Image: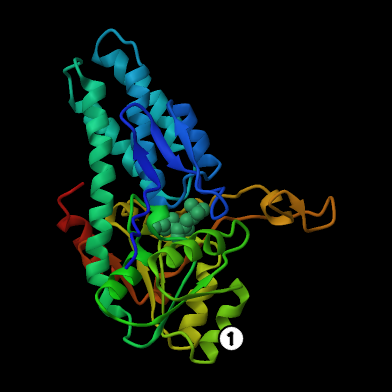
């Protein structure tokens, strides 16, 4: 296998360097992020995207906010850090990893009364979150790889690869783990309108990995399933409610219903930081609404008549009944999810 390590997030010692995902696959360029406000813009504009990746970026953003604070004492420091943290956590609403990482950073700062070197300790914590994420993905890959049938085919949606994480990927990580273990299969990946994470990013990753994948338009998935060309579907997740209802990229629900109609297993691969036990079901998940222009235009060129109205929900929620299993770093959770997800969360020690 070629050298395939894709690092979307890199701490240079002073700044964060992000592989600009809005420019891929045409150009591999990085953006330098030196302040927490710049990190918020990079998350909002999707230069960095994918639930775990925006969590890691948010952790560094809190560390950068901390180093900018001039405070007399811990209380004043925390008041200022809280203000920055609230802004960072609001950069995008659906992926809970963002809020999870910010909370982990703020809790650490709150418990650390020693003001000397507090910013350095927060930076160390951000680095830990960064490193842990890749290890978590590799563990998930180990648990999930057996779900892909030898000689079969797998469909994935959006980009849940190295680019969406600290490295390796969640859904793509499972596929990669299977491939690296010597399994052979065909991958299909959707283009994922309107932002084209599938066409631009996932296809690019599979090409780098040397895993055979065929790009399809989103609406071709049903026909391929009916023709028996798909043996399983694996996607990532942005937030999973306590009952297993799963928010992920718009179109995921459609794929899950089609998979059920065609008796194809539908799997979700996500770290435990994506599970939000505070929400009893998926109706409570806030769905990000992005600009109409992402739908009416393609890379700045109008595709629809001027003045046409569009709606652009970036995510949808797949009810738990369509989800065959949820692959986490603690193992493969099966229904009933209220039980299995609670056990998975309780069993992890890294957060
Ligand atoms: O809008 P995006 O590109 O951030 O959405 C990404 C997804 O929906 C991914 O499937 C999800 O974050 C899981 S990434 C490992």
Q: Residues within 10 Å of mark 1 (few under 14, many from 20)?
A: few
Q: Is residue 229 left or right of residue 64?
A: right
- Residue bearing the label numbered 1: 223
Q: Position of residue 274 (x, y in %)?
A: 34, 54
Q: Is residue 64 left or right of residue 132?
A: right
**Residue at x 56% of width, y 41% of height:** 45
Q: Position of residue 165 (x, y in %)?
A: 37, 52
**Residue at x 46% of width, y 30% of height:** 87
Q: Position of residue 190 (x, y in %)?
A: 54, 70
**Residue at x 45% of width, y 67% of height:** 207
Answer yes or no: is residue 239 visible.
no
Residue 83 quadrant: top left
Relative height, residue 61 to residue 222 (above, below): above
Furthest-right residue in view?
306
The quarter of the image holding the N terminus is: bottom left
**Residue at x 47% of width, y 81% of height:** 259
Camera-side residue of 156 and 211: 211
Camera-side residue of 256 and 193: 193
Relative height, residue 335 to residue 39 (above, below): below
Q: Secondary structure at mark 1?
A: helix
Decide if ligand 1 comes within 8 Å of the CB at mark 1. Answer: no
Camera-side residue of 230 and 167: 167
Q: Is residue 284 left or right of residue 219?
A: left
Answer yes or no: is residue 221 visible.
yes
Camera-side residue of 62 and 214: 214
Q: How is the image coloured?
A: rainbow
Furthest-top residue in view?
72
Residue 54 quadrant: top left
Relative height, residue 256 to residue 131 (above, below): below
């Amino acid at each position: 296998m070629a050298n395939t390590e894709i690092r979307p997030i890199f701490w240079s010692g002073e700044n964060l360097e992000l592989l600009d995902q809005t420019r891929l696959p045409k150009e591999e360029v990085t953006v330098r992020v030196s302040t927490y406000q710049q990190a918020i813009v990079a998350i909002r504009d999707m230069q960095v995207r994918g639930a775990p990746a925006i969590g890691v970026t948010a952790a560094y953003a809190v560390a950068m906010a901390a180093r900018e604070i001039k405070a007399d004492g811990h209380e004043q420091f925390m008041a200022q850090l809280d203000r920055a943290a609230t802004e960072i956590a609001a950069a995008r609403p659906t992926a809970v990893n963002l809020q999870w990482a910010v909370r982990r950073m703020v809790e650490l700062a709150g418990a650390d009364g020693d003001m000397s070197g507090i910013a350095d300790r927060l930076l160390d914590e951000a680095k830990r979150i960064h490193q842990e994420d890749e290890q978590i993905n590799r563990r998930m890959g180990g648990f999930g790889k057996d779900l892909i049938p030898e000689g079969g085919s797998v469909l994935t949606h959006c980009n849940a690869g190295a680019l969406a994480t600290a490295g390796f990927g969640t859904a793509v990580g499972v596929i990669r783990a299977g491939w690296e273990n010597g399994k052979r299969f065909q991958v299909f990946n959707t283009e994922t309108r309107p932002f084209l994470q599938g066409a631009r990013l996932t296809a690019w990753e599979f090409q780098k990995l040397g895993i055979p994948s065929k790009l399809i338009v989103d609406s071709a998935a049903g026909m391929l399933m009916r023709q028996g060309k798909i043996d399983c579907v694996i996607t990532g997740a942005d937030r999973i409610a306590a009952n297993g209802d799963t928010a992920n990229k718009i179109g995921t629900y459609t794929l899950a219903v089609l998979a059920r109609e065609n008796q194809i297993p539908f799997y979700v691969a996500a770290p435990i930081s994506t599970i939000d036990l505070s929400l009893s079901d998926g109706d409570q998940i806030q769905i990000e609404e992005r600009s109409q222009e992402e739908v009416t235009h393609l890379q700045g060129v109008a595709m629809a008549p001027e003045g046409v109205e569009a709606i652009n929900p970036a995510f949808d929620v797949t009810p738990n009944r369509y989800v065959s299993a949820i692959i986490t770093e603690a193992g493969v959770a099966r229904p009933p999810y209220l039980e299995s997800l609670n056990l998975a969360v309780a069993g992890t020690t890294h957060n």
